[in-house]
Amino acid sequence: MSSIPPQTTTASPVRSSASSEDELWYDALLFVDDECRERQRQEWDGRTGPGSTRPSTSMAADDAETLETRTSLQAGPSSRGDGTEGDDLAGAADRNIRRLELLERLRGVLRSNVAWEGQGGRSHTASLIRRREMEGHWSSSKRARVTSTVLPKQRPMVVASGNSRGYIGHFAADGEFFVAGFQNQVIRLYDVASQARHSDPWKLEVEVSAKSLNWTITDTCLCKRRRLLVYSTISPVLHAVKFDEYDDKTATRHTPIDFGEGHSNGAFGLWAVELSPDGNFLLAGSSDNAVYLYDLEDGRLATSAVSHSEDVNSVCFLDSRASDVFISAGDDCMIKVWDLRCLAPSNGDGRVARPQGTLPGHTEGVAHVSPKGDGRYLISNGKDQKCKLWDVRMMRSGAGYTSTLPRKHPKGFEWDYRWQPYPGDPHEDHHPDDCSIATFFGHKVLQTLIRCRWSPAETTGQRYVFSGSQCGGLFVWDVITGQQVAVYRHHRSVVRDCDWHPHRPMLATVGWDGNVVQWQDLAGEDEEKGGGVGSGARHPGNFVRAEPAGAAMHNLAHCIPSPALYCIKNRIVDE
């Protein structure tokens, strides 16, 4: 990550080149940072009893004087004026004098509450560094605020390549493993935690050959507590594999989990599967328009819900800390909200027919939904070529939306997204009852159920949303500014799935070209150079703020955020 020198009004008395100036600023910042760490270490080591307290602000000023003294001593013989230094020390003396000046300027910025200009002129980096010096640490939210301004560099590294289409690619919740699923029955589990350096390849932990395959592997999920890998293959039977029980890196023991026995009048397949946050339930969406909930503790089907009029393509739990509320989305263009605490059978066969609410807005089938994890917000990818942001508190309820009545939206186009381009205009096609918060454009949801996700909270504060695309790119949007901030290009075909490591600045993509690609280096260098494979400069995209009546407004020229974006910022980030 390249350092950004603070912009102050005081002119520098010493002239130097730009590279030398940056190097001096970098040295000064490192020196202050090292002093901060050393001071904290001494403070904690010096505590001898429970009555000791954290140093006050006045102590920080005393430490600043100590820092000045130590820095002066580092200036060498030239500061003593004994006349014994030679010409070779003159440059070093000038450099030390310059470092002292820069340290003083840096110290002044850190002690003030005024940040230097950053993106949008609202950077708080200087204020955060100043507080870290006084308080001794950064909270997780402050760390995320700083690292969220940096994206992984657009320099791809191919982890694995093959001749089969990649359909699944996601990290485990703790970032230890990466799961990649392919059309040729193969599921690979890579050990990411053992990667010591960015350039090191991922270690293959285990390879699974899927059972009962119908066309492809459609979804997978990991349960670290039970050491289980669960996968779906468009059949009524899921399979679970113990990924720590294998011979020669190949898992051979598959445990079937049957969702179809006694709960369907005919054959059906499971498209999506999700594990509950507590690890006790499996949630699955099927081709018979139903959502199933399986109890892993009891080994039986707990309940099922029928409300969609077409295939259920995606399911998820809304809150990462609770298993009460879950979401379903399907080809009927609707996103349904369900609450296990309120479910009650109502159609005579033990199935629930009425959700708690519906989120209308897509005019074509919904391919994927991804929750923010806070119990309120989620995003969705639709075949209408839109990625939408939702707040479940704005969901619609009533018989017109919660029953299995025909969907309420303009008649859709007669087309097949698997081999035809979208016949409409995403900017002009609107649902009359759209209740989404925002809509992002630019990617293509064609040929397959392309997935979208949130960036992690630890390193970005969930500031970004991103999606694969039929064009082979990975699109990243900033939720706060509404801009398309990056497009990562390397795959020669569809990018079906993608994910962001929960703790590292690392993105990973899986494509139909058979490649698993990671993007890990921090941004900066390639953006200045431009060009090359996967190294295009950032550029703004199109952003739409959905109005209550469903009409849309967007800025095509410079993507200027509307005042409503500040409301979105307060509701999503500050909460």
Image (tube, grey):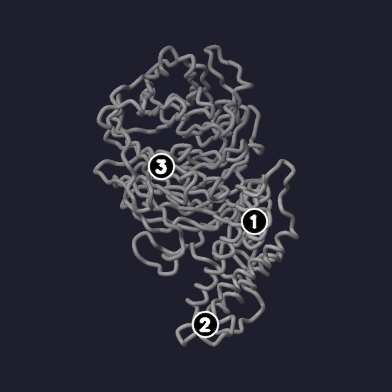
Count of marks placed on residues: 3
Instruction: Provide residue 240's location: percent of width, then percent of height.
Output: 38, 24
Quadrant housing the C terminus: top right
Which residue shows up at 30% across the image and 24% down it?
212
Numbered circle sitting on residue 522 = none
Is 385 left, or right, of 255 in this rendering?
right
Tags 1 and 2 touching, CB below 8 Å: no
Nearest the eye: 459 or 498:
459
Amino acid on which disc 1 is placed: Arg
Is 137 above or below relative to 555? above
How far, Cα to Cα, is label 2 from label 3? Answer: 43 Å
Tags 2 and 3 touching, CB below 8 Å: no
> Does dot 1 land on a helix, a strand or a loop?
helix
Number of other residues with Cα within 10 Å of mark 1, as a class: few under 14, some 14 to 19, many 20 or more: some
Number of other residues with Cα within 10 Å of mark 3, as a class: few under 14, some 14 to 19, many 20 or more: few
Q: Which residue is mark 3?
A: 193
How far, Cα to Cα, is label 1 from label 2? Answer: 30 Å
Nearer the camera: disc 1 or disc 3: 1
Number of other residues with Cα within 10 Å of mark 2, as a class: few under 14, some 14 to 19, many 20 or more: few
Which residue shows up at 50% across the image and 53% down it?
441
Amino acid on which disc 3 is placed: Ala
Numbered circle sitting on residue 132 = 1
Instruction: Provide residue 482's location: percent of width, then percent of height.
Output: 57, 55
Which residue shows up at 60% across the image and 74% down it?
72
Which residue shows up at 40% across the image and 19% down it?
257
Q: Which residue is mark 2?
A: 16
Is 359 left, or right, of 526 in this rendering?
right
Nearest the eye: 32 or 566:
32
Nearest the eye: 147 or 415:
147
